[in-house]
Amino acid sequence: MSNIMGTPGLDGRFGSFGGRFVPEPLVPACQELEAAFADAWSDESFIAEYRRILREYGGRPTPLTKCGRLSEELGIELYLKREDLAHTGSHKINNVIGQALLTKRMGKRRMIAETGAGQHGVASATAAALLGLECVVFMGEVDTKRQELNVFRMELLGAEVRPVTSGSRTLKDAVNEAMRTWVSEVADTHYCLGSVMGPHPFPWMVREFQRIIGEEASSQIHDFGIDEPDFVVACVGGGSNAAGLFSGFVDSDAVLVGVEAAGGAAISSGTPGVLHGMRSQLIQDDEGQITEAHSISAGLDYPGIGPEHAHLAEIGRARYEQAGDDEVVDALQRLASREGIIPALETAHAVAWVIREAGGEIPLGSKVVLNLSGRGDKDVAQVRAILRGDS
Amino acid sequence: MGAPNLSPTFESLTSQNHTLLIPYVMAGVDDAWIDVVHAVIAAGADAVEIGLPFSDPIIDGPTIQEAGVRSLERGTTAQSVLAQLQRDEFAVPLVVMTYYNVIAHLGHERFAGEAKQAGITGAIVPDLSLEELDGWERVAEDAGIDPVLLVAPSSSPERTKKICARSRGFLYGVARMGVTGERSSMTDELEAVVAKIRAFPSPPVCVGIGVSTPEQAKRVADIADGVIVGSALVRRVLDGEGPDGAGAFVSSLRNAIDA
């Protein structure tokens, strides 16, 4: 087995990416977390509890669904890993259950989290409620308006939502504010970061908590008489659902494809830089100032990408492609009308790439596994507005 | 035109039992920012921290964030600031404070070279932790720029020892766990962090984060070698008090420290 997607080095590097670029007050907290995670992840009782909760509460394992009608239309065999059926409607639950258990193990009573579209915020609030932790979610003011219902959902779950009014008032600013708050409250508070980004150990830890997606999918594909798929596809913002799925196939011959939003394509349009504690590919201007990402989906409006993805791109083990807003809306409608599944707008980026490239980059007859990372209920009002020409 | 070198200046002043005062000025925040630098020097600053704005300042609170946004909106860049500084002469050392991406993006060598030409002889890069320091440290020292490192209340004695040994010019003691910003009171973390640092050999110990009033500056001066004041001064500049207001505030700090 290769060491790709294994344990990063002591300094938290994936090739030249990753690391721990945080102010000194936070370094000890990151070291404490690294030690706590390494200890927990080698403790069978911790892993058993994590798996038990995901099974009895989180709805795992999620099924692998073969698309009948859409496969026929596209001339490929398309399989969907159904993270939309996990509790709270996306893969985010895998990570937050792990981190909430770790929070308790470290003796902390409170979690803070950032959120863009609200999925990670809702998942964090859910895990906090389940395990009796306090929860504060930072959300850009712009996003609190775009995703009002998710704000209310988090409040119903007992979390406090703090609108962030600094900078561009979106996801990257929510991360900034969560980090600032973590500095002053680190003694009793864990920062439950939502993706495979940030300072070491977060990119590694979050990938490990999402590894279960790829582990299940690589086994479930055998039930369809397939040894290994030809393509493994997932949308990428920070990149946690993609990292989880890819980890199950990285040692196979499958082509790994991450699909970014065209307006926030850190791999295709970005350059190396340091943000939020990591060295990765970033969207930035000529002066090294980070610029705002723009896409139809709040969850992909992030100007960076997890450092391990930057590394997978650099060594050529994964490819990173783009999908634009229009084809994403088309893809959402097509999956809904052909298969009865409404994907999240984030997820629809991956669907759009497969639809576009079937018979092109994806040869006819190929077997494709796509991570249906989240359900689209949260997006239906926005999609309706777009289709009616209201926005 | 230049400015004095940081390390020898601070060593000499500290050996004379002079307590150091380091105000922070956000570069490019308005047309008068260079005048503010001169005003705080005239009012008794021993060095000036020159802030280069960054879009995502994770250790800064609302005041310095606001100043950074204002400066960036005016089109400020690292190179425009350094070019402006280079045209002037300063009576005390200049220390740049910025985030690592601003330096990395321009390139270590180029940034260090242009900064030195502008009279900068110290650099505070808060998101460059001990573990990530190597590349920048080597280039900065070769160019004659002292890397100034931070010790926090959360730093273990083991880390503190390493940081004390590698910091140049002065050591930045973080007075409390939190971001920059004005505070109505100071906590016991101040005395604890200074005591922790004093256990090891280090360059002069200057303390900042949340030092907002002459009384607080005095409390810091009683135990540390120097006092760093940022947000309280930046707030006055943002409120339009200009070089005169900035100078008057720094005078009040100087008087309290020396009393």
Image (tube, coloured by chain):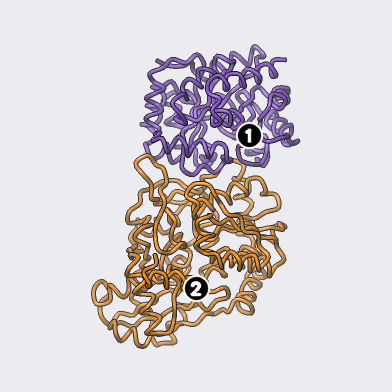
Q: Residue at point 39% right, 20% down?
A: B86
The picture quadrant where one finds residue A300 is: bottom left
Q: Secondary structure at mark 1?
A: loop
The CA span between labels 1 and 2 is 44 Å
Q: Specify the amino acid type for callout 2.
A: Ile
Towards the viewer: A71 or A261: A261
Residue at 59% in and 34% down:
B150
Percent position of residue B152, x then y? 64, 38
Relative height, residue A307 to residue B131 (above, below):
below
Residue ID at (46%, 39%): B54
Q: Secondary structure at mark 2?
A: helix
CA neighbours of label 2 inside 10 A, class few (<14), some (14 to 19), many (20+)? many
Query: x%, y% of residue B103?
Result: 42, 36
Q: Where does label 1 land, which residue?
A: B209
Q: Amino acid at mark 1?
A: Ile
Q: Residue furthest top?
A: B16
Instruction: Give left or right: position of A181 versus A359.
Output: right
Residue A9 visible, this angle: no
Q: Residue B151 in the image: state x and y as whole percent.
A: 62, 35
Q: Tell which residue pokes out farthest to the right in this image.
A: B188
Tag nearer the camera, 1 or 2:
1
Query: How many marks on residues?
Result: 2
Give the colour in which the image draws chain A: orange
Asked whether the residues under marks 1 and 2 belong to the same chain, the reply is: no
Can residue A266 be seen here? yes
**In front here: B131 or B66?**
B66
Q: Quadrant of residue B73?
A: top left
Residue A121: x %, y % from top left: 58, 63
Which quadrant does the N terminus of chain A fall into?
bottom left
Q: Residue A213, which numbered label?
A: 2
State the hue of chain B. Answer: purple
